[in-house]
Image (cartoon, helix red, strand yellow):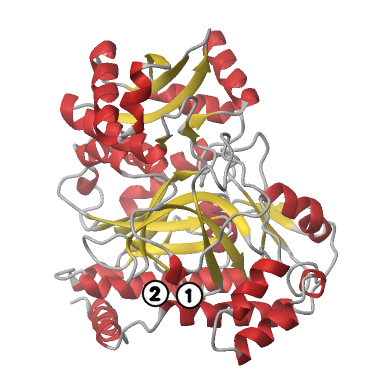
Amino acid sequence: MAIVGNIVKRGIGLSGLMKRPKSNLAKIQRKTLVKLLNKGRFTQFGEAFGFEDIMNAALYSSDKEFYTKYKKQVPVYDYNKMYKDWWHKTLEGEKNVSWVGSIKYFALSSGTSEAASKHIPVTKDMVKAIHRTSIRQILALSAYKNLPSKLFEKGYLMLGGSTKLQDKGDYFEGDLSGITAGKIPFWFERFYKPGKKIAETKDWSEKLDKITKKAKDWDIGFIVGVPAWIQILMEKIIKEYNVKNIHEVWPNLEIFCHGGVSFEPYKQGFEKLLGRPIIYIETYLASEGFMAYQTAPDTDMALVLNNGIFFEFIPFNEDNFDDDGVMIEKPETLMIDEVEEGVEYALLISTVSGAWRYLIGDTIKFTNKKKAEIVITGRTKHFLSLCGEHLSVDNMNKAIELACKKFDIDIREFTVVGKKMDGTFGHHWYVGTDDVVDTNGLMSFIDETLCEINDDYPVERKHALREVKMEVLKTKTFYQFMESKGKTGGQNKFPRVLKNTVQIQEWENYLANN
């Protein structure tokens, strides 16, 4: 009998029953900001921008004077400005720069929007916050009925970056998943796979090979990771053991926690690797923190409002961002109680890692304001609007998802490049699939679908946006390009839109030479 599993499941069930209804979301965020200000007020950043004054307003004023002060006294930052003004000092070993103490860990971002990786501070407080949110997500399984008790005794495969971080003398750097996995609670170690030894492996191909060799010895119930890499791993395991699907190796696999990119374009091909349906749970874990997760079946992700992150929302429009997705100096910002459902916002965050009014680069929409439920729609710089078509990554993902269903194909990766021609504009799609495809038919379907789901797109297709074309590539082409740039595995993703001139040139040169 699954004695331990029954105990854990009963505990999860009780935690669900004991959940108290959420109070006012603005009050929750107010308390979160007070805690952040209280810790940050004696830092160089806090003293420069009057945190003591803002905190007093939050503690002793019943209105929004505190937020008015916060917006007035603290400027907005993107990564480049935050690094230039503050974080470079943290990286050089200075203490109490934008957070208390010295910072020993830095997460290297995937670098999809810039040519080089970014160094994001990861404090002890942030690691604790991420672990707390992870535990909350496990407790949220009480909302998923009929899960077998034995599931809670099964392995938890986390496919992330190497836990063997790069020692830079004064600090360590690596993938966020490697930093957090290297500090998992002791009680979780018996469930954690692939285990400490394999998790330290730096070479991604070698790590996948080691996991594949050990797969038959593990009883996996949960898998966690970026869809593309999980799919590659499952294909390797299926091939290695000459089985029809992954459930012949892991019969108790029930749950896949995914994040990083939209899962829908992957879903068609992913489910071909399964022996039966499983539960999908979406998470929003970035290098800057654990932002949101799905709390129940058939819902969108809910923002985590009471665990070390204060959220602000910038309407993602021409008043606040230029044509390249660059934020203006003083954008309009809103608190959680001031947003509207269905409107696209860029996220600003203030965190226990010393990010303050920091543009994370993602765009979201609220689907349920009362429950703070959101969907990720794309990136501030990953969209196409050469001539007013306002084509978002969300639109592209939807068109690809529908195309996979229409043609019964598996499109693993894609990217789109905007082209300026003689007085007109064009979109060049690069699509990765190993299935036989009618390129013209696929492009026509995607083009027609975009006309249906985006009001601006069909107008521009009749006028300025004269050319849309497609090049179908083998899926491995995308991954081999990423490997050539040292960006395989972990949280690395291929960008859905290439706008950076250097990135476009590197991609086109790679295709020309390979």
In this figure, what is the number of numbered marks? 2
Query: Separation of disc 1 and disc 2 at Cα?
Result: 6 Å
Q: What's under tag 2, amino acid-wise?
A: Arg
Q: Position of residue 313 (x, y in %)?
A: 51, 60
Q: Is residue 442 visible?
A: yes
Residue at 46%, 73% (x, y): give it. Answer: 305
Q: Which residue is mark 2?
A: 136
Q: In the rendered structure, which amino acid carries the disc numbered 1?
A: Arg
Asked if the residue under mark 2 is in contact with the one under mark 1, i.e. CB atoms within 8 Å, the reply is yes
Residue at x-position 64% and y-position 77%: 36
Q: Which of the pair 138/70 is nearer the observer?
A: 70
Q: Is residue 167 visible?
A: no
Q: Where does label 1 land, which residue?
A: 132
Left or right position of 208 against 103: left
Question: Where does the image place residue 112, in percent across and percent down from the top left?
Answer: 56, 38
Pick the residue in front: 317 or 103: 317
